Amino acid sequence: MSETTQIGSDALLARRSGARRERVRLVAMALGPVFGAIVMSGLVLLALGVDPIAYYGYVVDRGLINPYGLQATLTRMGPLLLIAAGLIVAFRAGIWNLGGDGQFLLSAVVVAALGPLMVPYFPVWMVLLIGLLVGAMVGAVWSLLPALLKAYQGVNEIITTLMMTFLGVSFANVLVKLFFRDPATTVPQTRTLVVADRLPRLFDTTVSSGLLIGLVAIMAVHLLMTRTAFGLKLRIVGANPRAAIHAGLNVPLLTMATFAISAALAGLAGAVEIMGVQGNVRADWNPAYSLTVVPLVFLARFNGFASIAFVFLFSVLSIGGESAARRTGVPNFFTLVVVAILLIMLGITEYLDQRRRAAGK
Amino acid sequence: MTQIHTSSPPQAEPRPIVSLDHVTKRFPGVVANERVSFDLWPGEVHVLLGENGAGKSTLVGMLSGLQLPDEGGVLIDGREVRIASPARALELGIGTVFQHSMLVPSLSVVDNMALGGKWWSRPDRDGVARRMAAVCADIGVTIDPHAKVGSLSLGEQQQVEIVRALMRGSRVLILDEATAMLTPKGAEDLGALMGRLTKLGIAVVFITHKLNEALAFGHRITVLRLGRKVGEIAPERLAALGPAAATAEIVRLMFGAGVATDETAPAPRRGRRAGAPLLEIEALAVDDPSVPVAGINLSVSPGEIVGLAGIDGNGQKQFAEALAGQRRLAAGHIRLGGEAIERLDVGGRRQRGLRYVTDDRLGEGTVGSFPISLNLLLKQVGEAPFWRHGLEQSDAIATHARRLVSEFDVRTPGIETAIGKLSGGNIQKALLARELSGAARAVIFAKPTYGLDVQNIRATRQRIREAAEQGLAVILISTDLEEVLELSDRVAVMSRGHIVGVVDNDADARSRVGELMSGVTA
């Protein structure tokens, strides 16, 4: 009797320590690449003749410690979180929507043009609400063609969504320069939404409430994908499309829904960026947020909460990096270099982990 | 190397070109070939017959350099050789034409012939065309050397492959199920071509499932069964027997005697048909590029098991998927308990009690990375009580999973374990649990014991029997004749997308099903 309980508790203990080891492994898998990337980027900085300690010091100071920097960081997170939410839906459903930039930019341009026009006729809250809705719709509409082609013809959505981004970015420029141009300025840009009519700021800070919208969106998406029947259906389609057909799921319809949600969130990000931060769209403006968020979502393994952490990290890097770049003479794009190295590190970690697991078996 | 070896007259030496001398080949868990001897004589078409899994492919694999025997030897012209690669087989003069074309469809015939040359040298297209014309003239076929392979018919593509094999100096030609994809006319042409090849002293190994072809084109016939050679009919004997007697003899060899050899196997079930048919299929047709299915009429009574026998790839999969609702019907009606269900989708048919146990357990039956609990509900996502207002009810899902896991004896560390980590037998148990639980009325089993070990085979067959005893209408699709005969009340035989016959499972069912499967009566 005592022996069996002994064995039982041993097994329980083993399982618990196994679970702990598993958790440690996951954290190492997430943080390992980050540290690796910081070290590697430091070496690149050294090669450029820049003191990496000073660079990272500026990044941390301007992106995290300095109150204005931190507020800018948090504001930057809003649209990035929305884009991440859209990507999580799509990627978990096995749809590689890489057209977020086109969806984002077209929505931004339409909202920027529409907002100032509506201001004289509607109260501010209504202007903002309509702006957000229109932004989401424009994004969704711009994904309609790839969605139809994917759902009913099986055309590879990576190609079509990227193509639609090229078209969308160019089309957005055409709109800014020809139709939505503000006649009062000499540079081609849309009319500007005055600061009073933008998304409200949080408390007494400069942080835009876009951050809240982003946080709500990504948590809603996380719950949608993990706790609901609809999310499970999307995950089945993503994990094994043939099983989805076998189980009688309407795969084309689910594909259309995935595109619509994903692109609507990208469009919403565009609206939030305009009505919360920019106020207008200048010609040739394209922050290319979507493609930079893609690696972050991968780093987070399509997990909503982990995505918040990585988006925060990236925002610190990108806000702090802008100022660090100015002070150390490194190009602004160096932030992207860090992200790229991070992604390579992620790949290497994944490879090592798989080898370790294969060896363990 | 590019000339046909016509110089040595076939009658001069009474010695086989190639001999397999008591070869044995084992794979994990099975003996694919056990001390099989096989001689290939010049100027002869040697037919290799046997059911799926009888060991034909393994035997041919050892000749064409895909496999090496574990025991026994391969002799060419009396000398022992080691055929370690397909290239070595070609060097030794053994060419293989596989069932599926190995040509590049976007290239011309000549360019396909020139493939495999030195990468730095320009292909000598004119020279290749000239040599090709010579070989074509020898064997009496006409091929346009500049035609694109993709524009040729399957029969013509095979001719191209045969010509290519001859141009590389083959004295032995292996045709692996070469007629499976051909039209009857194409098969006849190939038969005539084989005749001309043997006149040139070439030895042909012809693998087929069709007895009529074997008798029409073959000179010598070897029958394999369960990895063993169970009989060889020499040319003189074949001629002496005549077609009818030869057929009877071959069927007897291929499918065994009328008595069940396994004494543990229960006697065939019989006479349990009760009442009006529950599942009725009428004039069902399915469009499919490879095996179109047409004119399927079948009705199954409650408590009845109808076996669907046939060589793999004769439309069973298409039929099952159309029945389950995964494929669009081209025509026909399906009635379950008198209600027409052919317009319903998978979910609608399932709700009315039609279940489908797929043979592709990991490919489509389950999502390998998902926990067992969710895989058990894969076809009920969103249904109460497991989901309410679209929200997951973890407790209900867990309770359901625990109940099924214990009821169907799924051996798993837990219900949250990813189903892909389980063994094949346990995945099958989980699938059976999903399909047989709830209000099932009719079940389609597709190759239910495929790839399972003995114990799980027995357990699965018991489940099928129990399902019928509970009054379910059962369709059992299987390529294993023993299984069909053990479980079924009636046996339908499927061939080339049609049901070619339905027989009651009585004493002489074995031989009649065997005849139907081999295309004797078709």
Image (tube, coloured by chain):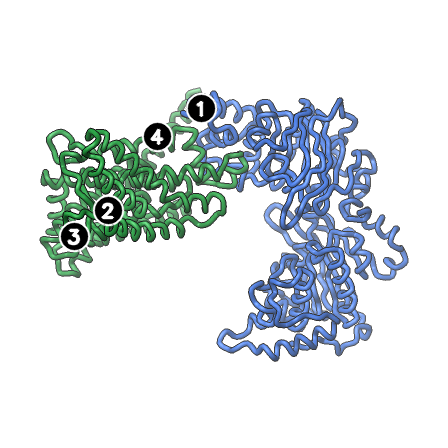
Q: Amino acid at mark 2?
A: Phe
Q: Chain of mark 4?
A: A
Tell me which chain appears green.
A
Is residue B393 shown left or right of residue B447?
left
* Residue A187, numbered label: 3
> What residue sits 68% from the left and 44% below the top?
B293
Marked residue nearer the N-terminal end (3 or 4)? 3
**Marks 1 and 3 belong to one chain:** no
Q: Residue at x 11, y 48 (%)?
A: A58
* Residue B240: quarter of image: bottom right
Q: At numbered mark 3, what does the secondary structure look like: helix, strand or loop?
A: loop
Residue in front for this viewpoint, B470 or B29: B470
The residue marked by circle 2 belongs to what chain?
A
Gap in Å between the C-alphas at discs 4 and 1?
14 Å
Residue, disc 1: B387
What residue would you read off at disc 4? A223
Packing grade of label 1 (10 A; few <14, some 14-19, many >=20) is some
Does residue B246 lie above or below B114 as drawn? above
Percent x, y of residue B373: 47, 29
Closer to the eye: label 4 or 2 = 2
Q: Which residue does the numbered mark 2 point to in the structure image?
A: A180
Chain under disc 3: A
Residue drawn at x 59%, y 22% as measured from the top left: B439
- Tell me which numbered mark, 3 or 2, is placed earlier along the sequence: 2
User: What amino acid is at disc 1?
Assistant: Trp
Q: Are marks 3 and 4 in contact (CB under 8 Å)?
A: no
Disc 1 versus disc 3: nearer the observer: 3
Percent across and percent down for residue B464 are: 66, 30
Q: Is residue A173 above or below residue B163?
A: above
Task: Label 1: state its secondary structure.
Answer: strand
Do marks 3 and 2 both belong to one polypeptide chain? yes
